[in-house]
Image: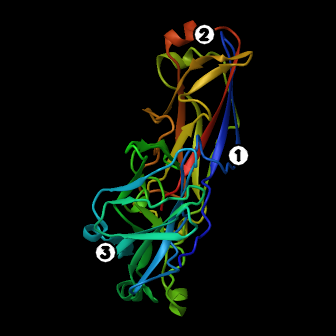
Amino acid sequence: MYCIKQAYNPTKREVSLLQGKKLGIFVLMLFMVLLDNPLFATHEYIAETAADFTVSGSQNMIGALVGTLVLDPSEPIQSLSISGSSFSSSGIQFYYTQNGQLQTSTISGSLYVQYYNTGGGLEGSNLTSDNSLSFNNLDTSQPISFYLLVNSSQYSSFLRNFIFSPKQFVGVGVIPKFTIRSASNNLVAVSSNQGVTTLPNPFLGGGASGPAGINSLSIGNSGIGFWSFFYNIAEQPLYSISFTNDVVDISNLQDAIISPFPINTVVLSVENFNSTYMGESRVMIRFYQSGYLSFRFLLSDNPSIFLPFSLYSEGSEIPYNSPFSPWQAPMGASNSATIQLMVTQQDYERAVEGTYQATITVEIISGI
């Protein structure tokens, strides 16, 4: 039997924007909010906050729940496809530091997918070299669970290297990602901390690729007996995000027409930086407006009328509702980036006079 661990909710901030058109005042107000629900959730993939190897599997395997796929019964799915290298060829990567350098060890393993059928029974499949799974009478009212399973003896042998050792155990990762398909073999959108997409979703975490994000998770509970207390395991980073100014006034929005105009500075803090491994880490964030497909100011008196705008950071355009990293590795305890705004001359001239407003959600995507 495989157990389900509690999933996590990424930290988010809402940004409220107000703009008085025609030599008006642009006001930026920032405040913190924690949201539990994803944007436009149809099928929601929830990644675990850390890899806790506390699940006992068959055939000398031990594993960790890495995520659950919560389904929308109104849109049935038929199959799951794996992209990238198979588990049999790529294995499970375990990252650790030695003499200040990041090292990798590979342990043989597999992906275990568990779901309920319409008769109430549990179905499960070990995916090693297979790259697809067809569901047998899938009960869409129950979530699909994803587990990483590794060879227990190999894993125990690997962990012994970290007992009273200067080596530091950092994380676990895999290369493969997944997509889901309908009965007609069409790709189905999945909402996750990567946004809403039909592109392959990472099984693990979020953020950048490699040991610092999409394909990796921090190590939580090592799952191997009494000696786990003495393993040198890096802590999971504790992130917070803030802004240098709560209110920003721009006397003339035309300043943001010729080039991106600085409006604020966003600061990402790692509260337990000295206890974490951040040498190769890149932390991704994403910006979006709930209910809309692009950045836009809405006319207060008539929200169907809007003024488009773009956001930039350090001169690079911030993609809408997609992972974006304004901070370069290696990360520090405090990491700042300038946020800029730009409107086009054509959109500005075409806008109806009045007061405009927008609410933008800024979300931290997990990474180690």
- In this figure, which residue is indicated by the disc labeled 1? 32
Image location (x, y in percent) of residue 233: 49, 77
Disc 3 element: strand
User: Would residue 123 appear left or right of 161 to someone viewing this image?
Assistant: right
Depth check, mark 2 against mark 3: the one in front is: 3
Q: Which mark is residue 106?
A: 3
How far apart are labels 2 and 3 at the CA level? 57 Å
Disc 1 element: strand
How far apart are labels 1 and 2 at the CA level? 30 Å
Mark 3: amino acid:
Thr
Mark 1: amino acid:
Met
Mark 2: amino acid:
Ala
| Residue shown at 28% from the left, 67% from the top | 129
- In this figure, which residue is indicated by the disc labeled 2? 351
Q: Quadrant of residue 198?
A: top left
Which mark sits nearer the N-terminus, 2 or 3?
3
Which mark sits nearer the N-terminus, 1 or 3?
1
Image location (x, y in percent) of residue 331: 47, 56
**Vertical relation: 137 (above or below) 229:** above
Disc 2 element: loop
